Amino acid sequence: MAFTIATWNINSVRLREGLVQRLMSEEAPDVLCLQECKSPVEKIPVEGFRALGYPHMVARGQKGYNGVAILSKLPMEEVAAHDFVDLGHARHVAGRLGNGVTIHNFYVPAGGDIPDRDQNVKFGQKLDYLTAMRDHFHAERPERAILVGDLNIAPREDDVWSHKQLLKIVSHTPVEVEHLGQTQEAGRWVDITRKDIPEGLLYSWWSYRAADWDAADKGRRLDHVWATPDIANAGHGSRVLRAARGWEQPSDHAPVFATFDL
C-alpha cells in the first residue's frame, strides 16, 4: 500500500479551515498531520474534512494554544498521547494505520527568544521536552513508525538562510541541534526529507515579520518527516509546498510531504 503523508503547522485550524480544505482538495494526502491547532478537540471543524474524504481523526487540543491532530483517509486508531515533561500541553498524538505503521505527530515547544535556560524558562522546557522524547525512544525503541511535526529546530547549516547569523537564534543554536540529534539517534530515526533531498537550502517556515517573505527568503526548515530504519527505504517523493505560504491569510509554515510504499 502506498500512502502520502503531509505535516503542517496550521496556526489555528478553525481560522484556517479553508486552507486545510484547499490542501485536501488540491494535494489530497492520505494522512494530514496538523500542529498548533489552537482548538479543543470537540471544536475542530471535522464535518468539512469528512466531506472531503477524511473520516478518521486522532487529536489532542486545548483552547488557544498548541494542539495536534492527525486526519486520515485511511482507518486509524489512537495508540498514544504523551505529555512529556508534564507541561499540560497538547503536543503529541499517535495513530496506527491498518498496515501496522504508527504515525507520531509532534509539536515541540518553540523555546522563546533567549537561548538560555537560566534567563528563559521556555528554552529550558524545550530542551527538557527533547530530552524526554530521547529517553522515551531509548526505552521503547520504535518500529514501523513515522514521526512528523513542527520540531521547531532547523538542524543543518543548509536548513537556514544563514548558518552564521542564526547560531545564537533559537531554533538553530548548537545546544538545540545537539538535543534534536540525540532524540533522532535514540529512535534511529531517518530524516526522510533529507534522504530524498540531500543537498541545498530547504525551508518550511518564513517569518510573518518579513514585508515580502518570498523575496527575502529568510527561511528555516522547522518541519520534519522521519521514519524508522525498517521502513525508511520505502519513503520517497519528499517536497515542501512552498506555494501554500503565499495563500490568503496563510500560516507561516508550509506543508511538507513524503510518500511511503508499504
Image (tube, grey):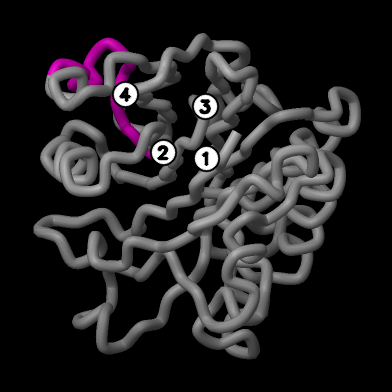
Q: What amino acid does circle 1 point to?
A: Tyr
Dot 3 falls on a residue whose secondary structure is: loop
Q: Which mark is residue 107?
A: 1
Tag nearer the camera, 4 or 1: 1
Q: What amino acid does circle 2 point to?
A: Gln
> Which quadrant of the figure has residue 166?
bottom right
Q: Is residue 219 depicted above or below 230 in this figure?
A: below
Decide which of tag 3 and tag 4 comes sooner along the chain: 4
Marks 1 and 2 in Cβ contact (< 8 Å):
yes
Q: Position of residue 2 (x, y in %)?
A: 49, 36
Pointer 4: what residue? Answer: 63
Packing grade of label 2 (10 A; few <14, some 14-19, many >=20) is many
Tag nearer the camera, 4 or 2: 2
Residue stretch in magenta: 36-47
Q: Is residue 16 depicted above or below 68 in this figure?
A: below
Q: Nearer the viewer, residue 194 or 121?
A: 194
Q: Nearer the viewer, residue 124 or 186?
A: 186
Decide which of tag 4 and tag 2 comes sooner along the chain: 2
